Image: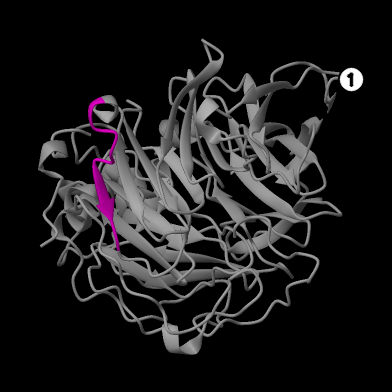
Amino acid sequence: MYATASALYIDEMGYAMSRLEIESSVCEDGNAIQEDSSGGQTKKPFRNLDDEIAQITKMKSMPHQQLVKVGTGRPELPVSPVKMLAGRESNYSGRGRFSSADRCHLLSRYLPVNGPWLIDQMSSRAYVSQFSADGSLFIAGFQGSHIRIYNVDRGWKVQKNILAKNLRWTITDTSLSPDQRFLVYASMSPIVHIVNAGSAETESLANVTEIHDGLDFSSNDDGGYSFGVFCVKFSKDGRELVAGSSGDSIYVYDLEANKLSLRILAHMSDVNTVCFADETSHLIYSGSDDSFCKVWDRRCLIAKGKPAGVLMGHLEGITFIDTRGDGRYFISNGKDQTIKLWDIRKMSSAPCNPGFRSYEWDYRWMDYPPQAKDLTHPCDQSVATYRGHSVLRTLIRCYFSPVFSTGQKYIYTGSHNACVYIYDLVSGAQVATLKHHKSPVRDCSWHPFHTMLVSSSWDGDVVKWEFAGSGDVPASSTKKRVWTRHFYEDYL
């Protein structure tokens, strides 16, 4: 009945203004778990996961056959670090060094579950926290107008303290350009501001110490309606921005021409999240409070004006989407308290309405109804569903773990119950739960190369979690050795 529209693409490739004057009480949601931060598999694994994504994930962390056979006896997985190192030194693979799969097989077993170590503490809620692509910088955005850029390689020193201009409600999102020269920030306004992140000025006060240029995302067909921007992202080449808004629309802004190049009335409700599917920027993924994920192909938008396809399975609004970067798979966080894994080749040409719910619920100030926890979408097209965290009060974000160190073997997410959850992508098991914060964790970020994860919360804390041996003692960041990508490349 719902014909697949993905055959053409096989070869390609709350609403934040919640009632926060009512301070949310941090309580265990019905789906949340209680376990030590070291983690353990507490949920039943999937019976079956799509063979292709499972195989791809396993291959990314499968060691060389000769390394598996090091020593006597029956080969076992995972291969011990001693055997891996012995095999490398004996050049069993014939390469003289670890491959990327060998490296991931070794590093992906060491999760950043120890700590945390305090990086910063602010008096306002943290809404955004993200590493730069090379891991040298870290950006945190707060409700109290502040955006801080930390230099990770220099002991987390504040490299730039930005005071946002014309802030409405909170910083909803930030994005750093691929060359790390510019940072854009959004709030509940159609104006997105851009700042010179690479300048020598430490204190960036809007239009006092530095210019914060405004990029106008409004268009002639907005009808004069003032909207807010929930999500904004740079393209891989740094020439464009893509954004989603409370005006139910997706926007593409051409930075070279300094003008809005595309507006799509994309959904029937707020577009909470949007991103480019891969480095080509041809495909865009969007997620909305209408519960649908949509795929947009810019190469045929002018002719059709419709999405390339729709993916359904969430019962409530979608808070965030993260792409796997291959133009095929992505994950989404939903207000139905689930993360879903999607394959765009399963998308349909038309949506299937799950029907009207028989209960009244608003995620901004209500717990998820117990009677809704076991409900499923009649036309669920997702590849897998992950449960355990809670998505309440704010637009909680989720991500794939890094390619370099884990082969994207894990999925991790913030949670309303003040924790960070890490799931195994293939088995669906919860492998770790990080507990420290006193309020919802809206955002978190895994370092692209180090075994390190940073979480930020509405309690104002920005903390880092690392893997450390039992004999390691937490030390100040300024005295800790910086393990860079080059170290891993040289020794792994």
| In-image side of 253 versus 393 (left or right) | left
Q: Amino acid at mark 1?
A: Val
Q: Position of residue 54 (x, y in %)?
A: 21, 58
Residue occupying the point 42% across, 59% down:
290
Task: Choose between 136 and 174: the one closer to the eye.
Answer: 174
In front of the other: 408 or 114? 408
Which stretch is magenta? 303-312
State the residue at coordinates (55%, 81%): 35
Point out the residue furthest to the top here.
257
Image quadrant containing the C terminus? top left
**Residue beneath disc 1:** 208
State whether residue 254 is above or below residue 171: above
Tell me if residue 320 can be seen: yes
Residue 245 colored in magenta in the image:
no
Report whether 237 appears left or right of 281. Answer: right
Q: Quadrant of the N terminus?
A: bottom left
Residue 456 in the image: x percent, y percent? 68, 55
Q: For mark 1, give the secondary structure.
A: loop
Percent coordinates x, y for residue 457 in the rendering: 70, 59
Residue 293 placement, left or right of 367: left
Residue 10 placed where, x, y %?
A: 13, 39
Q: Is residue 269 above or below residue 222?
A: below
Q: Nearer the viewer, residue 323 or 255?
A: 255
Residue 58: quadrant of the picture: bottom left
In percent of the image, x 31 and y 38: which residue is there? 296
Residue 235 in the image: above or below residue 375: above
Q: Is residue 305 magenta?
A: yes
> In the orientation shown, which residue stands out farthest toward the front?
223
